[in-house]
Image (cartoon, rainbow, N blue to C red):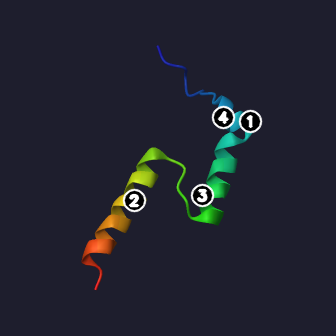
């Protein structure tokens, strides 16, 4: 059986998730692996194809 709709995250409890989100919003630098990859990929494409 599952957890019946209850989940616990130590990172959320300690405020780490909120701090990372706040940092990402204020600086414009993503803190997730996928976000960093998207930002780098976008930069490379803009470098080659920007008019």
**Mark 2: few, some, or many residues within 10 Å (few <14, many ≥20)?**
few
Mark nearer the N terminus (3 vs 2): 3
Dot in front, 2 or 4 = 2
Q: Quadrant of residue 25?
A: bottom right
Q: Earlier in the sequence, mark 1 or mark 2?
A: 1
Q: Give the quadrant of residue 51.
A: bottom left
Q: Nearer the viewer, mark 1 or mark 2?
A: 2
The mark tally for this picture is 4
- Residue 42: x and y in percent read 35, 65
| Pointer 4 local density, CA inside 10 Å: few below 14, some 14–19, many at least 20 | few
- Secondary structure at badge 2 equals helix
Element on which disc 4 rests: helix
Whether tag 1 and tag 4 are in contact, CB under 8 A, the answer is: yes
Whether label 4 touches label 3, CB < 8 Å: no
Mark 3 surroundings: few (<14), some (14-19) or many (≥20) residues within 10 A: some
Q: At 73% from the left edge and 41% from the top edge, which residue is drawn?
A: 15
For disc 2, the marked residue is 40
- Measured Cα–Cα span from mark 4 to mark 3: 16 Å
For this orientation, the residue located farthest to the top is 1
């Amino acid at each position: 059986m599952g957890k019946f709709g209850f989940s616990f995250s130590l990172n959320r409890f300690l405020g780490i998730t909120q701090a990372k989100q706040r940092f990402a919003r204020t600086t414009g630098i993503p803190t997730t692996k996928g976000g960093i990859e998207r930002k780098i990929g976008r930069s490379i494409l803009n470098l080659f194809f920007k008019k």
